[in-house]
């Protein structure tokens, strides 16, 4: 199931990664969005490549992209794309930038692809088909105690609500170790058992939809910080499943 969709998404993520790697030899053109975050000509070129191919191959599907917005569809399915996740790392030559492609059906991510071209990592999953990293099956960790957990987080400085910022810092103090990076590479580490949890108070659907499918197929869980299973609520919690309820309860106490 979803074999054609997965194959197309993997191929497009790899093509976008090749474009990103070639552009590293030049200086990308950098602009600022309305929110002051950077965007490059490579972000836009990768999204155009992915969007045009997906809409041509699956003409009934909708499309939601970080750079070009929404294209409506008739199939009840929607492709969710971040063509170059980690634009700041990309500009600075930090190798954790990626391309993220997800397919959502009935509000559930059923395809997820993460390609980190500078690290030679491609991670993918389809609903019911398992999760893979460079062709090898992956599974989440078995850590069941929060004080033994290694996690990653974003929002303790950026989130506008002081209560949530403090909550995030408070739960991070309960972990054994807080990993410094928070991006798609962190999500790959989560799905493959290297990290036990990731909490992001500021995620958009294009940031986390691909990872949601991969984490779920790797045996983990995803939700927003209130426990609702969605990638559209502005926050995301990924965990190995064993820690999930404790973290949700912490944020809602």
Image: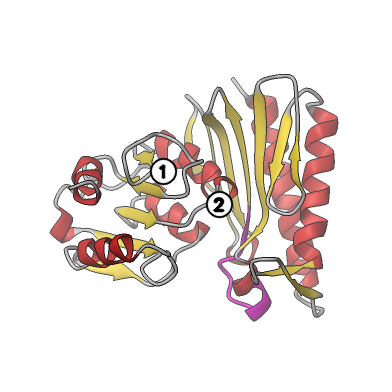
At x 37%, y 62%, the residue is 161
Q: Around disc 2, counting alpha carbons within 10 Å, would you say few (fewer than 14), some (14 to 19), or many (20 or more)?
A: many
First in residue order: circle 2 vs circle 1: 1
Q: Residue 180 lies in magenta, yes or no?
A: no
Give the camera-side residue of 121 and 71.
71
Closer to the observer: label 2 or label 1?
Answer: 2
Quadrant where the N terminus lies? top right
* Separation of marks 2 and 1 at Cα, in angstroms: 21 Å
Query: Residue 207's mark?
Result: 2
Residue range of the region highlighted in magenta in the rendering: 90-99
At x 37%, y 35%, the residue is 228
Model colouring? secondary structure
Q: Is residue 181 above or below residue 104?
A: below
Residue 101, by quadrant, is: top right
- Circle 1 sits in a helix, a strand or a loop, which is it? loop
Q: Is residue 221 left or right of residue 120?
A: left
Give the camera-side residue of 122 and 252.
252
Residue 47 x/y as whole percent = 77, 51
Residue 39 x/y as whole percent = 72, 67
Query: Residue 138's mark?
Result: 1
Q: Is residue 210 left or right of residue 182?
A: right
């Amino acid at each position: 199931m979803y074999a054609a969709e997965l194959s197309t998404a993997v191929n497009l993520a790899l093509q976008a990664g090749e474009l990103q790697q070639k552009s590293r030899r030049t200086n990308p053109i950098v602009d600022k969005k309305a929110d002051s975050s950077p965007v490059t000509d490579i972000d836009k070129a990768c999204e155009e490549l992915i969007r045009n191919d997906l809409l041509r191959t699956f003409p009934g599907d909708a499309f939601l992209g970080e750079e070009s917005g929404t294209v409506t569809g008739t199939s009840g399915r929607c492709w969710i794309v971040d063509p170059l996740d980690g634009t700041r790392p990309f500009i600075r030559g930090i190798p954790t930038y990626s391309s993220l492609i997800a397919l959502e059906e009935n509000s559930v991510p059923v395809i997820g692809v993460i390609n980190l071209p500078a690290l030679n990592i491609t991670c993918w999953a389809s609903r019911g088909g398992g999760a893979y990293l460079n062709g090898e099956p992956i599974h989440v960790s078995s850590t069941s105690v929060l004080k033994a957990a290694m996690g990653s987080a974003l929002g303790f400085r950026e989130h506008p609500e002081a209560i949530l910022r403090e909550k995030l810092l408070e739960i991070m103090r309960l972990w054994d170790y807080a990993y410094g990076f928070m991006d798609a590479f962190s999500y790959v580490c989560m799905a493959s058992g290297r990290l036990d949890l990731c909490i992001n108070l500021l995620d958009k659907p294009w940031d986390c939809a691909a990872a949601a499918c991969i984490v779920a197929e790797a045996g983990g869980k995803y939700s927003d910080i209130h426990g609702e299973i969605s990638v559209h609520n502005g926050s995301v919690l990924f965990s190995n499943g064993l820690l999930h309820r404790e973290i949700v309860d912490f944020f809602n106490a």
